[in-house]
Image (tube, rainbow, N blue to C red):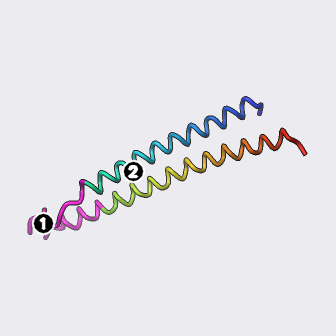
Amino acid sequence: MSGNDVNLVISDLRADADWWDQISEALSAGLQIMQDSCDLPYATFDGISHGLGATDNYQGTYDQMTTLLGAGVTETASIATRLRATANNMVATDEAATQGP
């Protein structure tokens, strides 16, 4: 690859990392909304709906969504970190190659 090609790849890796960070931030905002707004108190459900499992179903769905959103925040941030590390490694490798032995 020519120097320009390497620079384009590095730039693209960094741009992709920024994009994954934005996704992580959006998922984090969604998680915060879930935690702030979707925690219904036990008394919300009447005896019949509780007896039919609405309380348990609601809690199970809430737990699953917060788990999935939390994992999404972690994983997308990790992807961004790895993309930046790859870009940094390419820069370091390119610099080492131009300096020679």
Q: Which residues are magenta?
A: 37-62
Viewer-side residue, 51 vs 31: 31
Numbered circle sitting on residue 61:
none
Going by the image, does 100 lie left or right of 76? right
Name the outermost residue toward the right: 101
Q: Identify the residue at image location x=67%, y=32%.
A: 8
Reply above or below: 28 against 57: above
Callout 2 amino acid:
Ser
Residue 90 x, y percent position in the rendering? 72, 43
Q: Identify the residue at image location x=12%, y=66%.
A: 43
Q: Identify the residue at image location x=51%, y=51%.
A: 77
Going by the image, does 29 lie left or right of 77? left
- Packing grade of label 1 (10 A; few <14, some 14-19, many >=20) is few
Mark nearer the N terminus (1 vs 2): 2
Going by the image, does 95 lie left or right of 68? right
Residue beneath label 2, please? 28
- Packing grade of label 2 (10 A; few <14, some 14-19, many >=20) is some
Q: Main secondary structure of the magenta part?
A: helix
Numbered circle sitting on residue 43:
1
Label 1 – label 2 distance at C-alpha: 28 Å
Is residue 16 part of the magenta span, yes or no? no
Residue 32 x, y percent position in the rendering? 33, 53
- Quarter of the image holding residue 66? bottom left
Callout 1 amino acid:
Ala
For the residue labelled by badge 1, is the local secondary structure a helix, a strand or a loop? helix
Residue 94 x, y percent position in the rendering? 77, 40
Tell how many labels: 2
Q: Identify the residue at image location x=25%, y=64%.
A: 59
